Image (cartoon, rainbow, N blue to C red):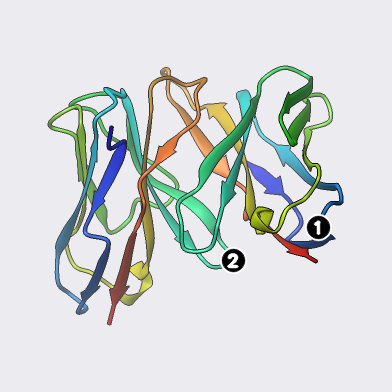
Amino acid sequence: GQNIDQPTEMTATEGAIVQINCTYQTSGFNGLFWYQQHAGEAPTFLSYNVLDGLEEKGRFSSFLSRSKGYSYLLLKELQMKDSASYLCAVSRNSGAGSYQLTFGKGTKLSVIP
Amino acid sequence: NAGVTQTPKFRVLKTGQSMTLLCAQDMNHEYMYWYRQDPGMGLRLIHYSVGEGTTAKGEVPDGYNVSRLKKQNFLLGLESAAPSQTSVYFCASRTGVNYGYTFGSGTRLTVV
């Protein structure tokens, strides 16, 4: 089976830095994705990590440690528009070339002035 | 480039009615997926397809059927709707297993 854990809610101040953690347990691990989802909208792709280390993309960075089953999403210089849910998703090989994403329940981030 | 298009966007069904949700993508993606999203539950995989003519069950397939007769279309059917199927349904596609999903805008379904 799979288990993906991330905090339910977080609050941070505009201009600050926030780190959203994700821990997972799975077999056939093939990478970890982060998505952003604004209320009432579809998720949009933020980042993909398949190897250990940090991937930086503008104000957003994502880190992966496969041995620890741990990832985090780092958001810098927070803006009000960053208020959204952030979804951690693990890709796994379920056999016969079949790969799907299993999503965590999401972390709702509120950015306050 | 439309990406992934879902129809309809909203629907209210009575218990026992049937309906089909259509997902169409114009990116020539091989892989297509149907998820449902419920408060406190996150996105859960219903069915998926790894190519034209193929389908497979996901985490929560009961009460749903799918078809992928054409590469660009992935249909999700509810034969006899139940209130437990009230949810937001998202279709997604991707070109390969090391790529992120592109999601459709979602279908908000209410079964009364």
Q: What residue is at 74 percent from the left and 26 percent from the top?
A: A56
Task: Write down the residue under mark 1.
Answer: A14
Q: Quadrant of residue A19?
A: top right
Number of residue marks: 2
Q: Is residue B32 above or below residue B64?
A: above
B105 relative position to B97: left or right: left
**What amino acid is labelled 2 in the image?**
Gly
Mark 2 surroundings: few (<14), some (14-19) or many (≥20) residues within 10 A: few
In the displayed orientation, state which residue is furthest to the bottom.
B112
Q: CA distance from mark 1 to mark 2?
A: 26 Å
How far across and how far down the image is residue A89, in percent?
A: 60, 39
Task: Write down the residue under mark 2.
Answer: B40
Q: Quadrant of residue B8?
A: bottom left
Q: What residue is at 31 percent from the left and 74 percent from the top?
A: B110
Q: Is residue A108 above or below residue A95?
A: below
**What amino acid is labelled 1 in the image?**
Glu
B37 relative position to B79: left or right: right
Q: Chain of mark 2?
A: B
How far across and how far down the image is residue B26, in percent?
A: 24, 30
Q: Chain of mark 1?
A: A
The quarter of the image holding the N terminus of chain A is: top right
The quarter of the image holding the C terminus of chain A is: bottom right
How far across and how far down the image is residue A46, in percent?
A: 60, 36
How far across and how far down the image is residue A69, in percent?
A: 78, 33
Q: For the residue labelled by badge 1, is the local secondary structure a helix, a strand or a loop? A: loop
